[in-house]
Amino acid sequence: MSSKNKPGNDLFLYLLRLGDTSLVLSHRLAEWCGHGPILEEDIAMTNISLDLIGQARILLGYASRVEGKGRSEDDLAYLREERAFYNVLLAEQPNGDFACTMVRQLFISSYQFFLFEALQKSADETIAAFAAKSLKEVTYHLRHSSEWVLRLGDGTAESREKTVQAVNELWMYTRDLFDMDSVDRNLLTAGIAPDMNLVKEKWEQKITGVLKESTIPVPPSDAWMASGSREGKHTEHLGYLLAEMQILPRTYPGASW
Amino acid sequence: MSTTENTQWKLWEVFTQPKQGEPYEHAGSLRAPDKEIALQNARDVYARRNEAVSIWVVPSECIAATSPADSGSFFDPANDKVYRHPTFYKTPEGVKF
């Protein structure tokens, strides 16, 4: 397709990747609503979820304007198929137990922290402003999740075992966070997106530090890694998530309340 | 006789300052295993809608409080001492208070 090479299309895809990650993770955290281990943590997780839905709205709203085909942010969120979603694979992984949710949050918040930190200097003013605003939220998400991983990892034998298991199960989705394709490289050249290798270095340093402090072993560097989110190839979990997230607007088109 | 182990986390009292320079007000209480989590929980439970610029958390057990039984000796004697209130003075005109 010739439109694939247009700069606007690169930007559109890039915005979908960022926006879909916030949207899908937001939905996962919202699944905890009413099921949190304690009332305070139930509120904490839904607070983070609401921050993420705010990010998704800004990013998908901007994506809608960049695309310029009359698809609204809601159309993008609710009327795209699984293969047209570009969120990182980690975001769609099921909540599992509380340790699993906190480890996933630590991995993604840390990724968003260093990514948004770099995006503050983006040549695209809308993205730079978005990054500056969202960085404050993500700073709190990162603090919350790393403090919990610390307590779970260095807590009881049971909490430690569950945390070790969560790290081992989710580790394979961490390389996908930093994969770069032609979209990333074109936007890097244009000064719009950062070099993900630099983001990855900072991420590894941060995560290694938290895991060591939590007495959790860091998985080996030659561990098998999944990838595919850049091409819209997902794990089996995203389809079910979208079915639940999209059923209302698809069943009652144009519904409002 | 069987006893039930108390698995609840420690109780904390939360005080929030609505604006810089204003006094801290009691916002409520919550449960948390330690100071850092207590602060985070207080932020999420009592300051998520822009209610505060600063938070104190205090273990509830560290607060000494009067009991209802004390109220007779603590507070009743103040009831009939109107002369403790400085309402018998005339304030000169122009004094701001």
Image: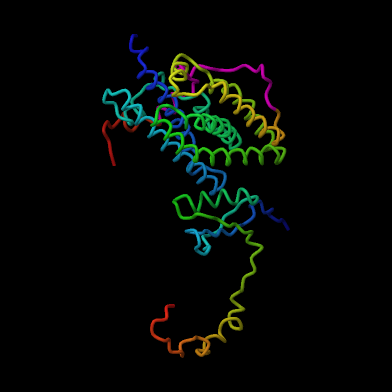
Q: Is residue A197 left or right of residue A134?
A: right
Residue A233 locus on image (x, y percent): 46, 17
On-image quarter of the C terminus of chain A: top left
- In terms of depth relative to the viewer, which is nearer, A161 or A222? A222
State how many labels appear: 0
Residue ranking furthest to the front: B94
Q: Is residue A8 left or right of residue A175?
A: left
Residue name at image x 68 percent, y 27 percent: A218
Residue A135 locus on image (x, y percent): 49, 37
Q: Per the image, is A43 magenta?
A: no
Q: Per the image, is A239 magenta?
A: yes
Q: Is residue A89 left or right of residue A209?
A: left
Q: Is residue B65 left or right of residue A227?
A: right
Q: Is residue A62 above or below residue B79?
A: above
Residue name at image x 51 percent, y 51 percent: B45
Residue ranking furthest to the top: A1
Q: Which range of residues does the magenta coloring cover?
A: A218-244
- In terms of depth relative to the viewer, which is nearer, A76 or B1? A76
Q: Is residue A234 above or below residue A206?
A: above
